[in-house]
Amino acid sequence: MISKWQVKDHEAEAQLFNRRLIVAGVLVILLFAALIAKIVNLQVYQFDYFSSRSDGNRLHSQYVPPARGLIYDRSGTLLADNQPIFNLTVVREQIEDMDATLGLLSSLIRLSEEDIEQFNNRLSRNRVPFSSVPLRYVLTDEEQSRIAVNSHKLTGIAIEPQFVRQYPFSALTAHSVGYVSEINRDEIERMDDETRENYGGTNHIGKTGIERTYEDILHGTVGYEIVEKNNRGQVMRELDRTDPVAGQDITLHLDARLQEAAIAALGDSRGAVVAIDPSTGGILAMVSKPGFDPNLFVTGISSRDYNVLVTDEINTPLFDRAVNPYPPGSTVKPFIGLAGLQYEHVDYEFAIEDPGYFRLPGVSYRWGDYTLRTAIGGGHGHTDLQKAIFQSCDTFFYDLGNRMGIDSIHEFLSMFGFGQNFALDINYARTGVLPSRDWKRATRGEPWYPGDTINSSVGQGYMWATPLQLATAASIIANKGKVVPPRMLKEVGGVAAEPIVENAIPDVMVNDPDYWRYIEESMTMVVHRAYNDVFRDYGTAFEAIAMADREMPYKMAGKSGTAQVVGISQDIMKTEDIIVSDLNKDHGLFISFAPAENPHIEPQIAIAVFVENGEHGSSVAGPVAKQVIDTYLLDILQIDFAALEAEAVAEAQPLIAAIDE
Amino acid sequence: MSSQDFIRQSAGLGSSTAKPRSIWRIIHMDPPLLVGLILLCCFGVMVLSSASGGDQEVVQRQAVSMMIGMVVMFIIAQFNIHFFRQWALSMYAGGIALLVIVLLFGVEENGAQSWLNLPGLPSFQPSELMKFAVPLLMAWYLASRPLPPRFKHLFWSAVMILIPSALIILQNDTGTAIMVTMSGIFVVLLAGIRWRIVIAGFIALMLASPAWYIFLAQEHQKNRILTFFNPYRDPTGAGYNIIQSQIAIGSGGIYGKGYGNGAQSHLDFIPESNTDFILAVLAEEFGLLGILFLIGLYLFVLLRGCFIAFTSTDMFSRLLAGSITLTFFFYVFVNMAMVSGLLPVIGLPLPLMSRGGTSVVTLFIGFGLLMSIQTHSRPKIS
């Protein structure tokens, strides 16, 4: 019975507990009092301060879009710049009645249904709450002041500056540099999450040309800022900021002056010019005429302007002729001829007696000579390969092609990029057609006929090539077989761009390197060999180029081609306000490289000219090529051919003297 | 002699035994406490409904949790409190065992590895169990020893409190560890530990805190302390919650912006507006009056808890009731002080207001114990 109970004094313990409980109770009351004091301080004494911070000031996290990288030409001329514009922007969360606000806005400024539709698209994009969304781009000064005057009625509406693309050369670079335009829903959906985040503050994305190809380099990395805004959407102060990383500037091989020269040389004609530096593969000029103003697309082209561009079925300004295929015509003859030498179907001595037509054994059909026009009844007579090239003798190539067969033609011309896209960074370029037995079976479901080969050997029939491909092929001849794939990009951020070539394209190897000299000589004859009176049509290139400019300080190698117009849509045929016969005219083509046969300097430029409905290759496209080459060699590179010659002579003088002695 | 003492004591304090057995005594409910809790629950659901932006699912789940809590409270209250006293040691031992199992096989959720999935049972947190096992054990231990406790008893008390707390800290659940420790310390304080020891302990804690800050505190804990002293040193990061909740509270004013009109809360400026920071929503929408009403309700429940502790006849019941009541207060105060900027941010919910079923059920278990103490006939101690 005598246990610990004895030492416990219950009453004393209870009293001890009660005292403690009372102390605890007092503490509870005191602490609650402190708490209430704190809250009274916040809610009563600091009410005005916190109330204004709550009503007026809000923390906003928003994207800071990176500045888009600029695009320069090879000499540092700006091809794509960023210019400030003023946009009308809306913070959706701060607008109570959107319809009423839009109604008020449209009474103040021009606001089309398209603007509103686009705005709704932008709103539905993934975005940060309380971020501003553009409603209209490019406010005029007058519109800005009207908004400013009414700003008290326009809570959540602001005028924000933005940098957008500006293309100072307008139509001149419309196809090659391309343009940026507003990101659309499809593009957003195709992005992965990371990319989508990176485009959080970006309104524009490259749609065509270089702007699209190098979007990743040009765009940069998004930044973030946290700002306090008042209830009018104005930024009161910036709290935190992660700077965006601007996109890198890029430099292209293009030369704006050469672009201008090419457009000028084409004159009023529709067509395309592609010029390549054979040693680097750099594309010096790539124009398609007519062009369009790419600046229209940047801030949203109006449907009226757009309709004008797409409904013009004759000029098709949006269509990039430089990278779309046409029958190459006789421009393929140097390549076919070289194939003949390589596969030993001809040699320098081989010649045919040309009656002016070609006939397959056992077939009565005669393949006439396109060049002669007079067709049956007279021919080039005794014709070797060289003469066949500079006189553009179809019959010779009919015979050669027929003997060589389509398989050899396909194999050899493949090495020059026909039927493929050799360009490293023009992935939108078409590949044209280099026909083969397999191709015909796959696409037409028909076997290959000997007649198909005959058409192919003069660049007609199934054969299609783009001006870009023709310029590339010409540059390979200029390089004596060395393949340097064409490219647009020269430098990124001032550092020479080294493109990653996954499958290096092998050089064209021939049995005897002298073949290159022989072909170059034949092509130079096309331009520089004076004609005689035997053939009516022979020598037009000479007449239009070398004879027209007797002072020409360099020689150019060339080959003309004439491509038959394959078909014209019935809609166009019915149009009354154009001369239909013009659209039926053949397309004129000319490939060239220069300077040719110059012992002191390698070819500096290879070029392909396409003149739509130009009728003649040599007389129409040839002078265009000459004009562009003149500009490049004489104005841009400023090569002094006489001085080169004199220098060489001066160097040779002691040798000659030594030999004389 | 002892029985004589006991009778005297009963006559003086145990007034309820003399009253006729009412319906409340039969169902073992304490009407004032019950009314206070029901009012708190209703207010809590109402505020949560606004804070969650009218999310029916959230509100319903909270209401269901509260119903379950009420039922649990009712069941607990049916047991005589001395039933729990008898089981105190076993519960404690079992709880420790479960904590060890959790450390070995537990499931991690929200950064704390405190959930246990036992086959056939709903997943639960053994650390919640310790919130009762510790005060039960301490009350059992100290009530049967002479008070004020000797140093030897204090030492063993400290060991009994610190073992589960340490295990819970290992689970990375500091908030619960603090609550478990406090519920044990409250028993010791109420048991009459000498003031000089209390003061000495307090000073020791003050002196140790810089060492803790320098050597033991984790980066986010340091941030919270620094942010407490100056929320604007990182206004968009660590200080964001506290700045935004102060704006919400301050802008509520005396009368509040009206139910459902809290701009800060509805524009998602307050993170955790459904859980730890729900007081900011209440303060913004109901103003100072709302806060006073809530504090009034809490105070009512607390005073009733004190009354129950005061009037119970044996030391075990007193200590347990006192500890449960003070722990409840501690919860309320720490959360409110944290949200209003009086204390650094500690992740503790506001009782019966914050969203979260486990916390609600745990609280009701405590109230069930209080009701059991209040409504069962006084024990016969031989």
Image (spheres, coloured by chain):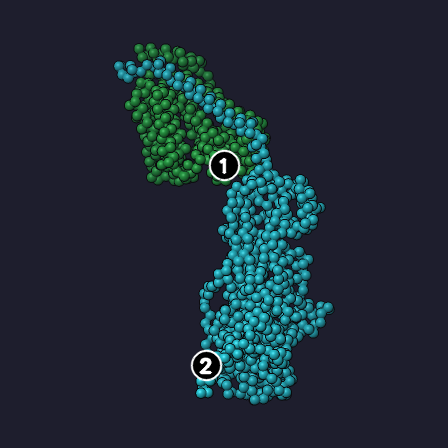
Q: Residue at x 56, y 41 (%)?
A: A237
Q: Residue at x 58, y 81 (%)?
A: A528
- Residue A475: image x %, image y %? 52, 73
- Residue B86: image x %, image y %? 33, 24
Say above or below: A560 vs A5: below
Q: Residues within 10 Å of mark 1 (few under 14, many from 20)?
A: some
The foreground one among A69 and A486 is A69
Three-letter amino acid code at disc 2? Asp
- Residue A247: image x %, image y %? 52, 55
Chain containing mark 1? B
* Residue A181: quarter of image: bottom right
Residue behind mark 1? B232
Alpha carbon of mark 2 to alpha carbon of mark 1: how far? Answer: 81 Å
The foreground one among A347 and A410 is A347
Q: In the picture, which chain is green?
A: B
**Chain A, chosen colour in render:** cyan
Residue behind mark 2? A512
Q: Residues within 10 Å of mark 2 (few under 14, many from 20)?
A: few
The foreground one among B288 and A191 is B288
Number of labels in the image equals 2
Three-letter amino acid code at disc 1? Tyr
User: In front: mark 2 or mark 1?
Assistant: 1
Chain containing mark 2? A
Image quarter in which the N terminus of chain A is found: top left
